[in-house]
Image (cartoon, rainbow, N blue to C red):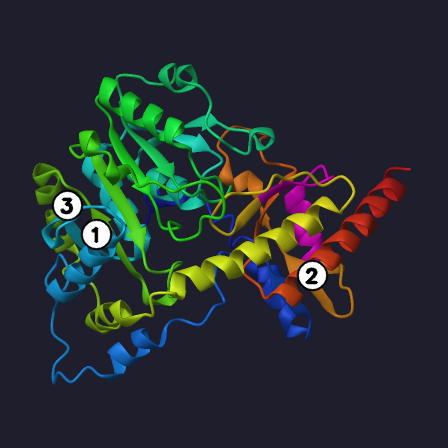
Amino acid sequence: MRLSQRVLTVPESPIRKLTPLADKAKKTGRRIYHLNIGQPDLPTPEGFLKGVKNFRGEVLSYCPSPGLPELLQVFSDYYRQREIPLAPEELLVTNGGSEALLFSFMAVCDPGDEMLVPEPFYTSYYLIARALGIKLCPVPTFVEDGFHLPAWGEFERRITPRTRALLVTNPGNPTGTVYTREEMNMLGELAKKFNLFLIADEVYREFVYEGEHKSFLEYSTLWDRILLVDSISKRFSACGARIGSLACKNPIIRKQLHKLAETRLAVAMMEQMGAIALAETPSDYFQRANLEYKRRRDITVAGLQSIPGVYCRRPEGAFYILARLPVVDAEDFAAWLLQDFYLDGATVMLAPANGFYLTPGKGKDEVRIAYVLKEEDLVDALAILKEGLRVYNNRSTASSG
């Protein structure tokens, strides 16, 4: 029997690639500080669990393919409070933000079509695109510029007759970059001039520390072409709930998205019931979470910048930092940390950044760090990283000598 080339050519997730090494280390009793994955550690609001526990139905029946009407209304209310005009019928409940991405890609691209994406970018974009036969065309950004967008020409010269969409994350993963209004205006004008869709991933909307976040759906002139990807995973620390959403104000596109939703029948009822109850979350929840992650960001940036040879910029949002390390191969270093280096019985797990790039050779000396640990744990993890770099580079120097 023969497997499809589609599945054989989809790479492993670089975020989870080193998980077997971490699992092996844990079995020996070692402690791993996970800086590799954006799993928030703040408690999920109690309302979610209450919403699940308070379900009184006798049968777990299929939900409507677009989602429970009550949850669609909750999402609509959330957006309207943020001056993003979305009616319930303009929203679709999805199995996490990942399914929203999958549906978006399927709706606007055929195999062989292309999407422009600022690089570095969230790894799942490539995994999904590869599985669908879509070509991602990276537009380079650089750490020295805080990963902000290049000029118009860098986008225009990559547009071909097969280009169908611009794909952007704001605030950014893995960069933490928050686009300025000028950058967003440029993307909007590009989309209109070249008749492109604009897929906007805004799952980190609530985590902005400098500047001002503006949703692409606040631009009414772009309503005919925007697909807005969102999720409760990050903002409510509810990654395991797998509740996302896909918003679109264009009724022609929405009709096609609904057909895709029908192929998987429905999103799980219990998780939707929990998400509905999130509407009861105290109004200051996001403010408190934002302040907590801002403190963690400042601790992480200060710790990284105190390590000789490390270079990073202070991100404006999300909870990631992309840092350049004084190593030749960050993936080899990350694996070495898990296999061979421990400080007081503990080590750190990093996400090598080469998986966030498509351009050959880019990101080889970079790592993504998710500052989703408690402050004292971040301090310990950064101390381990600092000592690990010293030992690793001394070892490398001795070996070459």
Q: Residues within 10 Å of mark 3 (few under 14, many from 20)?
A: many
Q: Residues within 10 Å of mark 2 (few under 14, many from 20)?
A: some
Q: From this viewpoint, is residue 266 visible? A: no
Q: In the drawing, what numbered circle is on residue 80?
A: 1
Q: Which residue is mark 3?
A: 257
- Whole-angstrom CA distance, mark 1 to mark 3, is 22 Å
Q: Residues within 10 Å of mark 1 (few under 14, many from 20)?
A: few
Q: Which residue is mark 2?
A: 379
Seen at 79% across and 42% down, the residue is 308
Seen at 45% across and 48% down, the residue is 208
Label 3 or label 2, whichever comes before in sequence order: 3
Label 1 or label 2, whichever comes before in sequence order: 1
- Tell whether label 3 touches label 1 (CB within 8 Å): no
Whether residue 4 is situated above or below residue 97 in the rendered picture: above
Seen at 46% across and 44% down, the residue is 173
- Please provide the residue range marked out in magenta: 322-338
Whether residue 162 is situated above or below residue 81 in the rendered picture: above
- In-front residue for pair 184/310: 184
Q: Is residue 331 magenta?
A: yes
Q: Amino acid at mark 3?
A: Leu
Q: Amino acid at mark 1?
A: Arg
